[in-house]
Image: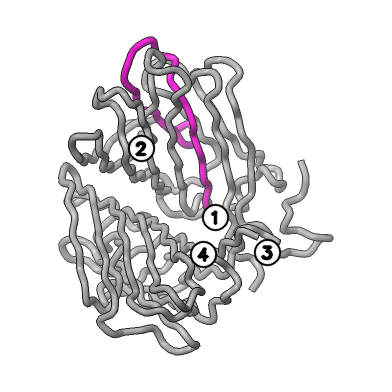
Amino acid sequence: MAVIEAIETVYLEADAASVEFSSIPATYEHLQFRLTARSSYAATGQATLDVQLGTGGGAVDTGTNYSRHYMRGSGTVDDASAATGSTAIDCMRAVNANETSTKYSPSIMDILDYANANKNTTVQATTWADKAGSYPELGFASGLWDATGAVDRVKFTLTGGSYNFVRGSEFTLYGLKSS
Amino acid sequence: MADPAYIVDGVLTDGEAWVGLGTTTLGVDTTTVTFTSTDDGQVGDWSQYMDLFLIIYGRNDRADTGSDQAMMVLNNVSATGAYTYQYIRGNGSAASANSSRGQTTLPVGYFIRNLETANIFCASTIHLFDINSGKYKSGLVQVACEIDDGSGYDYAGLIALTANSQAPITEIDLTVGYGDWLTGSSFSLFGILPRMVA
């Protein structure tokens, strides 16, 4: 039995408002997403890459049940922020459409003990948006879904669904087992 | 070399997604550590992997105290403007951040010099993403350099990387800013496969 298995890879052949992984099997101990994403957002700054979780075969939870802490380096600035009562975990970034077309933002997000129905779900993420027009942004985050359901669905959007993931964005979900 | 493990009796399967591509442990002080794709369709051929993951556990042979930055070059490209980085780090008394464009190399961590306490090695873990795509290549690095002398040269941090090139990654070269990698430094490379069977 493999320790780390690739469960699903999504490669966008066309722009998409969201990317969703459903029917995630409960047979692993932890999940890891590895992705490279680009946003259609073309104004100042960059889009947040948001995460929503679901359980029980239903849709993802869109209620105000998420929180997160975020630290970043942006040029010479280092700072931190937090949010509670959010409708998603905005824990990653996707490079802006004004940037060179071949730039995509890499991110890694871990979802720990995701199949345990007795624990609220914690995630951790690291992300990088290389923005030349102003400072780039390197961030790392913790996030919480304030629900105990076993996670079987994960949805990614950009700034609450306001923008599209650009063609070529790629997401792979891995399952981690220790035995 | 052998066929990749995901080819079983000629059939494509999804097995272990992380594939060990080799570990180098230095028997002598070494200026540059190099990993190269075998480009032969077998396990060591990087063209089959989505991402690469590299672990450095190293020490610098420079006869001084403190630490030095380590550098990475991809595909032997060290032209001005080839690379961009952003870091955030803490040195025990302060957090700081910085970024730079127009670089000729990529910073990938800090490694203890050889007049510091013996047997301390520093670590960096380096993720390189979508290495065979037409995207500019990008990376995330986690840094752990714990000297334990209060010098301010120890760091915990993250570094983000961009290589301004669409070329697939086929070679990685690793150096320290001054001096050589010390004997005993180790370097492990893994290939990370995508899901291959629908």
Quadrant of the frame with the C terminus of chain A: bottom right
Magenta extent: B51-77
Of all residues shown, which one is farthest toward the top?
B63
- Residue at label 3? B14
Quadrant of the frame with the N terminus of chain A: bottom right
Of all residues shown, which one is farthest toward the bottom?
A58
**Looking at the image, is mark 3 or mark 1 earlier in the sequence?**
3
Q: Position of residue B17 (x, y in %)?
A: 62, 57
- Residue at label 1? B50
In this picture, residue A175 sits left or right of residue A99: right
Q: Which is closer to the viewer, label 2 or label 3?
A: 3
Q: Mark 4: give few (<14), some (14-19) or many (20+) Cα within 10 Å.
A: some
Kindly indicate whether the residue at mark 4 contacts the one at mark 3 (C-beta within 8 angstroms).
no
| Label 3, label 1: how far apart the Cα atoms are | 14 Å
Q: Mark 2: give few (<14), some (14-19) or many (20+) Cα within 10 Å.
A: some
Q: Name the secondary structure under disc 1.
A: loop
Q: Amino acid at mark 1?
A: Met
Q: Amino acid at mark 2?
A: Ala
Kindly indicate whether the residue at mark 2 contacts the one at mark 4 (C-beta within 8 angstroms).
no
| Label 4, label 1: how far apart the Cα atoms are | 20 Å
Q: Position of residue B123 (x, y in %)?
A: 44, 34
Q: Which is closer to the viewer, label 4 or label 1?
A: 4
Q: Circle 3 marks a residue in which chain?
A: B
Q: Circle 2 marks a residue in which chain?
A: B
Q: Circle 1 marks a residue in which chain?
A: B
In-front residue for pair A101/A140: A140
